[in-house]
Amino acid sequence: MAISDLPTLSILRTKMQWHQERQSVLADNVSNSNTPNFRPRDLVEPKFEIGSGKVDGGATTLAMARTSTGHIGADGADPTFGENKRAGFLTRPAGNAVSLEDEMLKVSANQMDYAAVTSLYSKSLHLIKTAIGKG
């Protein structure tokens, strides 16, 4: 089996390619922030199947747990973290709907996620090299 056939490395490569493409789309949104009737675009995050050695990229809810009597309880509150559900976006009189603040937040998050995936990929390669005695 070649190193490139390992499912973990394949997932990480796919994720890095997705982040690269998303960066291009987000940069296009920012560069067209003054173009009339321009609507911002974004990419759908890839989903990975469970059971085939791949990870599910879907969102899950995280319930709060009270591990000590000194912790504040969630009595009467929803035991999950809320999501930011901003409905829609503002459109300028020229028809442009790009919010530079939102786009820059997406660019920053994308950059941090890409750095994390790149780090995982290089550490995985280093671990494999160490295991076969070449690292």
Image (cartoon, rainbow, N blue to C red):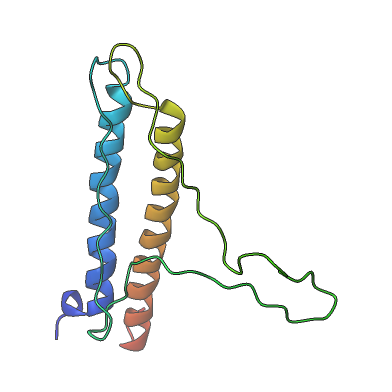
Q: Nearer the viewer, residue 100 or 130?
A: 100
Instruction: Count the marks.
Output: 0
Q: Nearer the viewer, residue 25 or 115?
A: 25
Q: Position of residue 80 (x, y in %)?
A: 57, 67
Q: Is residue 81 above or below residue 1?
A: above
Q: Is residue 60 left or right of residue 36?
A: right
Q: Residue at x 29, y 30 (%)?
A: 29
Q: State the residue lying farthest toward the right.
A: 70
Q: Is residue 116 left or right of residue 66?
A: left
User: Quarter of the image containing the N terminus?
Assistant: bottom left
Q: Residue at x 80, y 73 (%)?
A: 71
Q: Position of residue 116 (x, y in %)?
A: 43, 59
Using the rendered view, name the quadrant where residue 55 is placed: bottom left
Q: Is residue 58 left or right of residue 18?
A: right
Q: Is residue 99 above or below residue 106?
A: above
Q: State the residue lying farthest toward the front.
A: 76
Q: Position of residue 76 (x, y in %)?
A: 69, 67
Q: Position of residue 21 (x, y in %)?
A: 23, 46
Q: Residue at x 23, y 78 (%)?
A: 7
Q: State the residue lying farthest toward the top.
A: 93
Q: Is residue 131 above or below residue 31?
A: below
Q: Nearer the viewer, residue 87 or 48?
A: 87
Using the rendered view, name the quadrant where residue 77 is placed: bottom right
User: Quarter of the image containing the C terminus?
Assistant: bottom left
Q: Residue at x 43, y 34 (%)?
A: 102
